[in-house]
Amino acid sequence: MWFRNYQQKLKRLFQQGLTPKELARSIALAFWIGIFPIYGTTTVVITFLALKLRLNLPIMIAVSYVLTPLQFLFLIPFIRIGEFVLGYQPMVMDLSTLKALFSTGLFETLSVFSGRLALAVGAWILVALPVSVLLYIILFQIFRKVKRFKTENLVDPA
């Protein structure tokens, strides 16, 4: 009996947020949060937003996991954009400098990079938010046309 209750809850979780608008919102929001420049925060934020906004959590988690390589790939460009926009001198980030920083200790490295991560978050808001809105508009149009095509083809003309 308890197993069936959990099974029904899990089934509802997979089925919620399946309208074209909700699907587009789920994917666009997962994209926006999925490339957040601070690693380790995306799953918690996506889970909270999906449950609060009643979006499709499995799709959002899957999109976030697929975007993990981009999250690492965009870190330095986000830092550079933040430095440029806010007028900071670019920080040297070659391999030898990073090795020397990490050899001093994790907390010292984090204290040096915390300001640059703040710059990366600012650049993430400036760049990723408009891209996510554009992605939402495109996906909504695609999903709406797919749904319309499916419903038109399901109706039997005979």
Image (tube, rainbow, N blue to C red):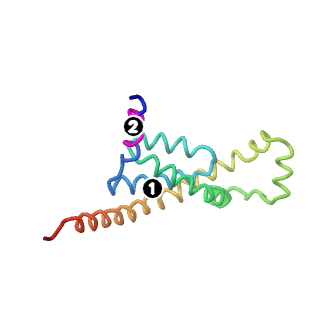
Task: Depth check: give the residue in front, 150 or 35.
Answer: 150
Determine the residue located farthest toward the top in the rendered image: 2
Q: Do the residues labelled 2 and 1 touch (CB within 8 Å)?
A: no
- For label 1, the crowd category at 10 Å Cα-Cα, with few meaning under 14, some 14 to 19 and many 20 or more, is many
Give the position of the C terminus as an image quadrant.
bottom left
The mark lying in front, picked from 2 and 1, is 2
66 relative position to 111: left or right: left
In the image, is residue 9 part of the stretch drawn in magenta? yes
Q: Which residue is drawn at 64% across and 51% down?
A: 119
| Disc 2 target residue | 9
Residue 134 image position (x, y, % from top left):
43, 63
- For label 2, the crowd category at 10 Å Cα-Cα, with few meaning under 14, some 14 to 19 and many 20 or more, is few
Determine the residue located farthest toward the bottom in the rendered image: 158
Tag shown at residue 27: 1
Amino acid type shown at disc 1: Ile
Residue 42 image position (x, y, % from top left):
56, 46
85 relative position to 48: left or right: right
Residue 155 image position (x, y, % from top left):
19, 65
Task: Depth check: give the residue in front, 43 or 149.
Answer: 149
Mark 2 or mark 1: name the one nearer the start of the chain: 2
In the image, is residue 59 part of the stretch drawn in magenta? no
Instruction: Give the extent of the magenta segment.
Output: 4-12
